[in-house]
Image (cartoon, grey):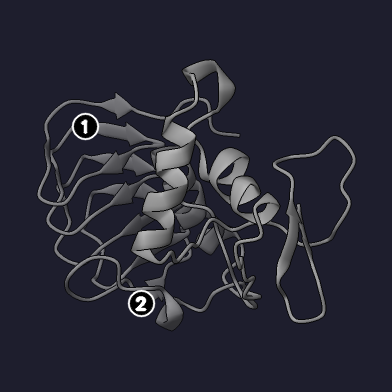
């Protein structure tokens, strides 16, 4: 939780408190002056390993706030999603299918070279190209250039540009990397809710 003053200067930052003290959260978008960050990390690195967590929100920013460094908050409005892990990246894409009004397809950030998916099908597949006849797709996001051969089954997955799913392969809750050639079935993130 983040506490700020009227000018949005951060007065307190508490990582996942038991009792929330604010309706603001830390989104982990940070900009630092290199010389200031170097100075802070030098001080923290002099501590024993059991005296700090090596973490921005638990160590670096609380130290800077307590030492009087200027830490400024910038409110983020609109759609926001934490995609910092492969599981969260997949969940963020699946949220686009479940709640298409949250972020219109034309506003999907271009984090990869090339075009972005621009069409959602009745099967809940976000794509920019017609689906391959004979391929079974459900609740997935297909980036341009991804290929799903007839007889392949893709569910609750993300295929990055140029990924290829061979006939007979079943992908479930998986992120296929750009250019990856999938010739074996995979259930990469079975713990998803």
Is 29 on the left or on the right of 117, as rendered?
right
The residue positioned 61% from the left and 68% from the top of the image is: 70
Looking at the picture, does residue 41 appear above or below residue 31? above
- Is residue 84 something that shows in the picture? no
Q: Quadrant of residue 98?
A: bottom right
Label 2: state its secondary structure: loop
Q: Secondary structure at mark 1?
A: loop
Spot occupied by residue 145 in the image (x, y as percentages of width and height): 14, 63
**In the displayed structure, does residue 167 sit left or right of residue 35?**
left
Circles 1 and 2: CB atoms closer than 8 Å: no
Residue neighbourhood size for the residue with mark 1, other residues' Cα within 10 Å, grouped as few (<14), some (14–19), many (≥20)? some
The residue at the point 51 percent across, 38 percent down is 55
Cα separation between marks 1 and 2: 25 Å
- Near-viewer residue (188 or 32): 32
Q: Which residue is mark 2?
A: 118
Vertical relation: 69 (above or below) 16: below
Looking at marks 1 and 2 on the same chain, the residue that comes earlier in the sequence is marked by 2
Residue 115: x and y in percent read 22, 76
Residue 179 place in picture, x, y as percent: 10, 50
Check disc 1 and report the residue beneath it: 169
Q: Please provide percent x and percent y for residue 75.
A: 66, 75
The quarter of the rendered structure image containing the C terminus is top right
Q: Nearer the viewer, mark 1 or mark 2?
A: 2
- At a point 31% along the width and 35% down the height, the residue shown is 171
């Amino acid at each position: 939780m983040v506490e700020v003053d009227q000018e949005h200067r951060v007065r307190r930052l508490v990582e996942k408190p038991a009792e929330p003290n604010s309706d603001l959260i830390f989104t982990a978008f940070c900009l630092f002056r290199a010389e200031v960050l170097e100075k802070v990390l030098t001080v923290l690195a002099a501590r024993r390993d059991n005296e700090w967590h090596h973490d921005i929100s638990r160590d670096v920013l609380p130290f800077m706030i307590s030492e009087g460094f200027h830490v400024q908050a910038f409110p983020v409005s609109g759609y926001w999603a934490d995609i910092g892990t492969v599981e969260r990246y997949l969940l963020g894409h699946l949220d686009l299918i479940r709640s298409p009004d949250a972020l219109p397809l034309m506003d999907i950030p271009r984090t990869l070279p090339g075009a972005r998916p621009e069409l959602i099908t009745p099967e809940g597949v976000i794509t920019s190209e017609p689906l391959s006849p004979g391929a079974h797709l459900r609740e997935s996001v297909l980036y341009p250039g991804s290929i799903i051969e007839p007889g392949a089954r893709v569910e609750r997955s993300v295929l990055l540009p140029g990924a290829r799913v061979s006939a007979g392969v079943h992908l479930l809750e998986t992120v296929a990397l750009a250019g990856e050639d999938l010739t074996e079935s995979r259930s990469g993130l079975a713990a998803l809710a």
